[in-house]
Amino acid sequence: MARWAEAPRSCALGQTTARCSEGFSRTHTIAIVLAWVLKLTWMIWLVVVAWHAGFGARVAWP
């Protein structure tokens, strides 16, 4: 039984390969790429805000 439980997990990890499925639909692909772009933009924004706030200058290393 443990062997069968691993099959869906491997299919989920390799969703875009033809081995388990045909991949995501075009709508889902666009949503996934948009989510990645928004996350990257948010991370860059946080770095810029932290840089301008001067958090790096206040860190005291022992």
Image (cartoon, rainbow, N blue to C red):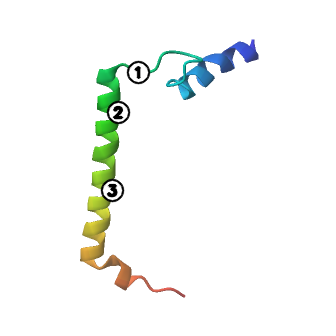
Q: Name the residue type under label 1.
A: Phe
Q: Name the residue type under label 2.
A: Ile
Quadrant of res 31: top left
Looking at this rendering, what residue extends furthest in the front direction?
18
Give x and y (percent) for residue 21: 52, 15
36, 3: nearer the viewer: 36
Callout 1: helix, strand or loop? Answer: loop
Q: Are marks 2 and 1 in contact (CB under 8 Å)?
A: yes
Q: Distance from label 3 to label 1 (Cα)? A: 26 Å
Q: Residues within 10 Å of mark 1 (few under 14, many from 20)?
A: few
Give x and y (percent) for residue 26: 32, 22
Q: Which mark is residue 24?
A: 1
Q: Distance from label 2 to label 3 (Cα)? A: 17 Å
Q: Are marks 2 and 3 in contact (CB under 8 Å)?
A: no
Callout 2: helix, strand or loop? Answer: helix
Q: Which residue is mark 2?
A: 32
**In front: mark 3 or mark 1?**
1
Quadrant of res 3: top right
Q: Name the residue type under label 3.
A: Met
Q: Which residue is mark 3?
A: 43
Q: Is residue 10 depicted above or below 39 in this figure?
A: above
Quadrant location of the C terminus?
Answer: bottom right
Q: Earlier in the sequence, mark 2 or mark 1?
A: 1
Q: Which mark is residue 37?
A: none
Does residue 11 appear to the left or right of 59 in the view shown? right
